[in-house]
Image (cartoon, helix red, strand yellow):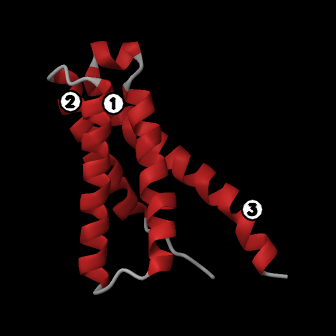
């Protein structure tokens, strides 16, 4: 199965997650609150994807976790670094970068573990 990932859409997702984490760092939100907010943003993205597609098939949940949640967790973990908590606006640049790197890593890992075995 071929899955297309549109880079502008993924960058918009990463900026949304990064903007929330910048806001949470400037407000002094603790890790649990920031993690819950990040999950809320991921759910908001899932609902918007489902509304845009008209449905949300079970297979789509796997891709949502892979292409939205995993990279969002990477941005969350980067946002917890002390240097970024002191200067949270740096996350606007490093957030999308870490999101994209985690997305590529998740896609490569998925293809190595699952997609290559299905093609045989």
Local crowd size for mark 1, using a 10 Å CA cut-off: few (<14), some (14–19), many (≥20): many
Compute the Cα span from label 2 to label 3. 35 Å
Vertical relation: 45 (above or below) 91: below
Residue at position x 52%, y 59% from top?
66
Residue highlighted by disc 2: 24
Residue at position x 14%, y 23% from top?
27
Work out which quarter of the rendered image holds the N terminus and state it: bottom right
Q: Which mark is residue 113?
A: 3
Residue at position x 19%, y 19% from top?
28
Vertical relation: 112 (above or below) 20: below
Residue highlighted by disc 1: 91
Q: In the structure shown, which secondary structural element does the residue marked by tag 2 occupy?
A: helix
Local crowd size for mark 3, using a 10 Å CA cut-off: few (<14), some (14–19), many (≥20): few
Vertical relation: 52 (above or below) 41: below
Mark 2–mark 3 CB contact (< 8 Å): no
Where residue 17 appears, as percent x and y from the top left, is: 30, 45
Where residue 59 appears, as percent x and y from the top left, is: 50, 78
Marks 2 and 3, the one that precedes in the sequence: 2
Vertical relation: 64 (above or below) 99: below
Where, by quadrant of the figure, is residue 81 drawn?
A: top left
Q: In the structure shown, which secondary structural element does the residue marked by tag 3 occupy?
A: helix
Where, by quadrant of the figure, is residue 54 drawn?
A: bottom left
Q: Nearer the viewer, mark 2 or mark 1?
A: 2
Work out which quarter of the rendered image holds the C terminus and state it: bottom right
Q: In the structure shown, which secondary structural element does the residue marked by tag 1 occupy?
A: helix
């Amino acid at each position: 199965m071929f899955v297309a990932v549109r880079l502008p859409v993924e960058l918009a997702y990463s900026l949304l997650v990064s903007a929330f984490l910048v806001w949470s760092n400037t407000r002094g939100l603790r890790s649990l609150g920031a993690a819950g907010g990040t999950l809320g943003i991921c759910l908001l993205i899932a609902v918007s994807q489902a509304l845009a597609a008209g449905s949300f098939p079970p297979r789509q949940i796997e891709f949502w976790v892979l292409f939205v949640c995993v990279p969002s967790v990477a941005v969350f973990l980067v946002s917890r670094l002390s240097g970024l908590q002191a200067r949270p606006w740096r996350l606007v640049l490093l957030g999308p970068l870490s999101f994209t790197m985690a997305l590529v890593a998740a896609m490569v890992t998925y293809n190595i573990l699952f997609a290559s075995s299905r093609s045989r």
